[in-house]
Image (tube, helix red, strand yellow):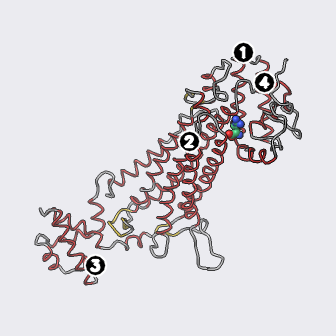
Amino acid sequence: MTQSPPPGDAARGDGAGRSHKLWGGRFKAGPAAALTAVNRSIEVDFRLWPYDVWASQAWAGALASAGVLTADESSAIQAGLAQVAKRFESGALPVDSDEDVHTMIDRLLHDEIGDVASKLHTGRSRNDQVSTATRLWTIGSIDSIESELRALQSIILRHAESLTDAVMPAYTHLQRAQPVSAAHWMLSHFWPLERDCNRITMASIAASSLPLGSGAIAGSAYRVPRDELRENLGFIRLSENSIDAVGDRDFIADMLYAMSMIGVHLSRLAEDMILFGSSEFGFIRFGDTFTTGSSMMPQKRNPDAMEIARGFAARSLGGITSILATMKGLPSGYNKDLQDDKRILFDVVDSALLVLPAVTGALAECTFQVDVMERAVSSGMMATDLADYLVGKGVSFRDAHGAVGSLVRAAEEAGCELSELPPERFTSAHASFGADAREWLDARASIARRDVAGGTGPNAVRKQVEAAKSALAESTSSFQAESRP
Ligand code: ARG
């Protein structure tokens, strides 16, 4: 077999302890230590190895189809890559010259099969390679995030089902507003997560565009069957433009946007839980296994998991900000700034995969003090209902609002509840108030009246629970390939 070694006298595969580089032939002197240190990305991109091995195997196949490799060479490379994967699985570690995971795989491949390994890099570049592997990683990570989101949604749904008869105050401006079914409140945290699942699915679709074949920027000089590659690697479509393909990190921005929305939603759920779990509210009790104590105050029971979730939102917002700032104003094609995309992406996804199970666990362990919740509903929260009562008697809403407002003020001045005002006070506020007006101050009746689709009424909530169940049942990620590593 004739060999065409990659540039650089140190480029030949020569085993672990020695230097192995994918470039270097055109330089008289080697890179400065400070450049090597700052340029090195293997600590971050090491985890891409299963995807880079897989894409490399597909590339070896494509090179054979293009007539660049013989069938034997292609099989030798593919089998060698399988051995490389085994070495990673059994704990192979980078050596000093492993600038990035692509270099390390190339070194191990030379180690396994010798010089024929040098043919693998024909017609490809780390520019199309890294984007391919990162896209595959992203698609895989979306599966994990989705299953964590689904687990959290299931707990929310389980609680909601147990809370359908519980009544609690709903707040606007964090002031008592109107009574709602506690299940309705609980499910208000289900739907944002449902939208998050849709958003990460969209990010996965965005990631599913194959850059391989783009080479460094102008496209591969060999007639590699890109569609076959696409099929083998489970991508939905091919990149349309090689210049765009090697510099396109939109999928990472899409993913990080979806992740920051997850962060935002988790922070709102967490904040409700923290607030409702405080002694001042007392609606929720956190369990023992997801609360921490204080080193000084023996009585403390801190909802750390929820607070960390609230904090994660900041990190996720940092992620989307960083990637957009990296992309902004970058010249077309690949630029080394982009190497940091993975650090940002991995950090946010890793954190989410720590945070989500903790939130799910903490929420699962919570108990709801339904009597405390119901006691927190004061009759003043049914002021709107009283106005609706007057509307039923033919009064305009504006006038009704004014009349009930005067009752609220009267109760406030008398230091009593709206329900404790004498009946004559009602009639003096508006002549249309009858003896039955007080029935409109009942919280459950107020809830029952709001049976509009999407409202807090019992039938509407029952339907909402069913809709949530079917959303969970329908959740699939069927567009994703089954054969990924
Ligand atoms: N480690 C690089 C990255 O993550 C791989 C691409 C390197 N490309 C290059 N032209 N030096 O972005």
Marks 1 and 3, the one that precedes in the sequence: 1
Image coords of residue 5 (percent x, y): 82, 25
- Secondary structure category for the residue under label 3: loop
The answer to whether the residue bearing label 4 lies less than 8 angstroms from the nearest atom of ligand 1 is no
- Secondary structure category for the residue under label 4: helix
Instruction: Count how many numbered circles sit on residues in the image.
Output: 4
Image coords of residue 149 (percent x, y): 53, 50
Q: Amino acid at mark 3?
A: Glu
- Checking the image for residue 329, the label placed there is 2
Q: Residue at x 63, y 75 (%)?
A: 294
- Checking the image for residue 417, the label placed there is 3
Image coords of residue 408 (percent x, y): 24, 75
Q: CA distance from mark 1 to mark 3?
A: 87 Å
Marks 2 and 4, the one that precedes in the sequence: 4
* Contact, mark 1 vs mark 2 (Cβ under 8 Å): no
Q: Mark 1 = which residue? A: 67
